[in-house]
């Protein structure tokens, strides 16, 4: 009989505090960019963050994104390698989980969805945002990119991107602090949890359940990513049981219907439907999404109910539903 793993409780007091917390290191860097270049320069800097370029015109930015790669003290390189191997062996299935489960799962957090909707980055060019997300994940899932420093730089640029969005949201004065700080610690933890634990949960629900050691390795890899990205250790789950507990706490606190969540989900569905090569299968992305999310979350996001297609989802190979990546 396996021993029951210990888990933290993640009190509302802790979550309330971290909902009002950003990332002091990254936020100070963004403030310095603004003070030196004003808003025009900050917008240009934000565009640079979306590129693969390693150098920027401000030396302190280069010092940060090109700092000597150093893993957090809890990181286990062999376990990280196992997590990366797990991803490589299940790329197609994990890709479906990210698109049809992880992303809409994030949109279910009403206050977190506000900052995504206000930025207009997702619904105005959903395909480009999906491509950026895919590029990030494929970069950090390759061992060579951890060895040559590219993975670190990619993660740190996303960290600065989050800080930029926080600054933009608060600068324009339309953000209500009762929603929490834009891209706060709770929302960042929830997003990384969606990309790790929720993906694992989706894989369990599909046709092949991973081994527990593979699940733990994949979660550990994302924990390392989360730490480098600026998520506080208080919200980094030590194991799958703790990831389950943290997910339940965040969902209870944040999941509710919102116009922003519905708009983001609608834009995502329309983009996924464009990937379906067979016109007769156009309803299958919605069916796949509802199957993975469950009716409760799917309903609050406005995912269409397609009963006939939903019955077929467990039996249809993913490659028949979506075009392979070019």
Image (spheres, rainbow, N blue to C red):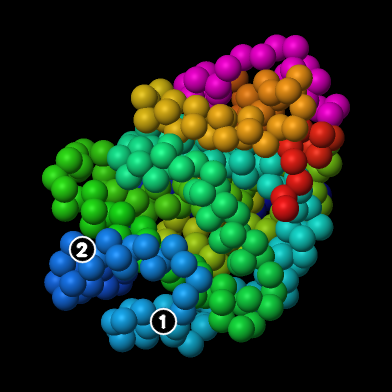
Is residue 281 shown left or right of residue 25?
right
Q: Secondary structure at mark 1?
A: loop
Residue at left 68%, top 21%?
Answer: 283
Up the image or down, 144 lies above or below 169; here it is below
Q: Which mark is residue 40?
A: 2
Identify the element where label 2 is drawn: helix
Question: Residue 272 appears at what percent x and percent y?
Answer: 62, 34
| Circle number at residue 80 | none
Residue depicted at x 52% and y 75%: 152
Report x, y in % for residue 257: 40, 23
Q: Is residue 298 magenta?
A: yes
Q: State left or right for residue 174 relative to residue 232.
A: left
Give the x, y percent position of residue 50: 44, 63
How packed mark 2 is, by other alpha carbons closer than 10 Å (few <14, some 14-19, many 20 or more), is few
Count residues near mark 1 (Cα–Cα under 10 Å), then give few for <14, some for 14-19, many for 20+: few
Residue 156 sits in quarter: bottom left
Along the viewing direction, whichever of 35 and 257 lies nearer the viewer: 35
| Tag 2 near tag 1, CB within 8 Å | no
> Please, which residue is most extreme toward the top here?
307
Identify the residue shown where x is 78% and y is 52%.
90
Going 35% across and 38% down the picture, which residue do you hit? 117
Q: What's the distance in space between the residues labelled 2 and 1, CA to CA?
A: 19 Å
First-in-chain label (2 vs 1) = 2
The answer to whether any part of residue 291 appears in the image is no
Quick check: 236 above or below 297?
below
Which stretch appears magenta? 296-316
Q: Name the residue that disc number 1 marks.
A: 55
- In the rendered structure, does residue 101 fall within the stretch colored magenta? no
The answer to whether residue 69 shows anywhere in this view is yes
- Depth order, front residue of 105/326: 326
Query: How far across and how far down the image is residue 130, in percent?
Result: 55, 47
Q: Main secondary structure of the magenta part?
A: helix
């Amino acid at each position: 009989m396996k021993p029951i793993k210990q888990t933290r409780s993640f009190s509302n007091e802790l979550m309330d505090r971290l909902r009002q917390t950003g990332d002091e290191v990254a936020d100070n860097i963004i403030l310095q960019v603004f003070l030196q270049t004003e808003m025009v320069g900050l917008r240009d800097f934000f565009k640079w963050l979306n590129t693969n370029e390693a150098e920027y015109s401000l030396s302190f930015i280069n010092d940060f994104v090109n700092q000597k790669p150093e893993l957090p003290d809890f990181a286990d390189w062999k376990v990280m390698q196992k997590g990366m191997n797990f991803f490589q062996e299940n790329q197609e299935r994990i890709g479906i989980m990210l698109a049809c489960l992880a992303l809409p799962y994030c949109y279910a957090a009403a206050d977190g969805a506000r900052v995504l909707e206000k930025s207009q980055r997702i619904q105005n060019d959903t395909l480009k945002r999906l491509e950026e997300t895919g590029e990030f994940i494929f970069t950090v899932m390759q061992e060579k990119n951890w060895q040559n420093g590219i993975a670190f730089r990619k993660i740190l640029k996303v960290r600065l991107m989050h800080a930029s969005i926080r600054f933009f949201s608060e600068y324009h004065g339309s953000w209500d602090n009762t929603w929490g700080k834009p891209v706060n610690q709770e929302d960042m933890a929830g997003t990384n949890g969606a990309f790790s634990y929720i993906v694992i949960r989706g894989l369990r629900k599909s046709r092949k359940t991973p081994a527990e050691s593979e699940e733990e390795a994949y979660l550990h890899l994302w924990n390392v990513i989360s730490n480098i990205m600026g998520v506080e250790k208080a919200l980094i789950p030590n194991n799958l049981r703790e990831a389950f507990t943290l997910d339940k706490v965040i969902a209870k606190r944040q999941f509710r219907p919102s116009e922003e969540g519905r708009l983001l989900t609608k834009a995502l569905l329309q983009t996924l439907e464009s990937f379906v090569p067979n016109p007769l299968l156009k309803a299958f992305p919605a069916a796949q999404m509802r199957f993975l999310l469950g009716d409760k979350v799917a309903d609050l996001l406005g995912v269409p109910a397609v009963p006939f297609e939903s019955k077929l989802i467990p039996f249809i190979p993913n490659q028949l539903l979506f075009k392979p990546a070019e």
